Amino acid sequence: MKRRPTADEMLVRMAGLCAGAEQCVADIRSKILRQGFPPEEADRMIGYLRENRYLDDDRYARAYATDKVRFSGWGRMKVRMGLRAKGMGDRTITQALEYISEADYGEALRKVMSAKAKSLDLSDVKDRQKLYRHLASRGFESQMIIAAMRKLMARLAEGEG
């Protein structure tokens, strides 16, 4: 049976985790509570981590948003839901979404659209609907999807593929 770490050991462990990669308060709190620490002790540890800049939800939200767009091909709506699930507030979420570069966002949409379009026959209306639904499920906004699909269809009509 594993020994529960002391409060100081747990604090050092959480500081190391935060130093290695951005973490959010909700995830750190959950890890501390799962080790059997009372909520007051979790609050004390989180307070220390915040004061010493190991933990910052705004910084985490910006990293989360840019990484999900750049590496996972998520749209803003899906990023918003992910951050909300992590317990982020509206101000933090709004700032994180504003931090996403338009170039990265457009590129993410194009990559996701191109990858899915390869398996579809875009001359078929049902396949175009599948493509639209796929992009919407990835969290992209309707007007962006429609504009990107129009550009793709125009390129296909011109024979550029």
Image: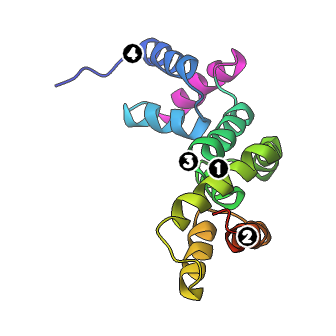
Which percent across, then down, holds residue 6? Answer: 39, 15
Q: Nearer the viewer, mark 1 or mark 4?
A: 1
| SS at circle 2 | helix
Residue at label 1? 83
Foreground of the two, 156 or 1: 156
Which percent across, then down, holds residue 68? Answer: 61, 45
Residue 72's disc is 3
Which percent across, then down, holds residue 13? Answer: 45, 17
Q: Residues within 10 Å of mark 3 (few under 14, many from 20)?
A: few
Q: Nearer the viewer, mark 3 or mark 2?
A: 2
Foreground of the two, 84 or 52: 84
Residue at label 2? 158
Q: Amino acid at mark 4?
A: Thr
Residue at label 4? 6
Instruction: Give me the C-alpha separation between circle 3 and circle 1.
Output: 15 Å
Residue 52 part of the magenta-drawn span = yes
Magenta segment main secondary structure? helix
Q: Is residue 2 above or below residue 142?
A: above
Question: Image point 21% across, 23% down: which residue?
Answer: 2
Q: Is residue 79 visible?
A: no
Instruction: Give me the C-alpha separation between circle 3 and circle 2.
Output: 30 Å
Q: Are marks 3 and 1 in contact (CB under 8 Å)?
A: no
Q: Are marks 1 and 4 in contact (CB under 8 Å)?
A: no
Q: Nearer the viewer, mark 4 or mark 2?
A: 2
Q: Are marks 4 and 2 in contact (CB under 8 Å)?
A: no
Q: Which residues are magenta?
A: 38-54
Instruction: Give me the C-alpha separation between circle 4 and circle 2.
Output: 67 Å
Q: Amino acid at mark 1?
A: Leu
Q: Amino acid at mark 3?
A: Ser
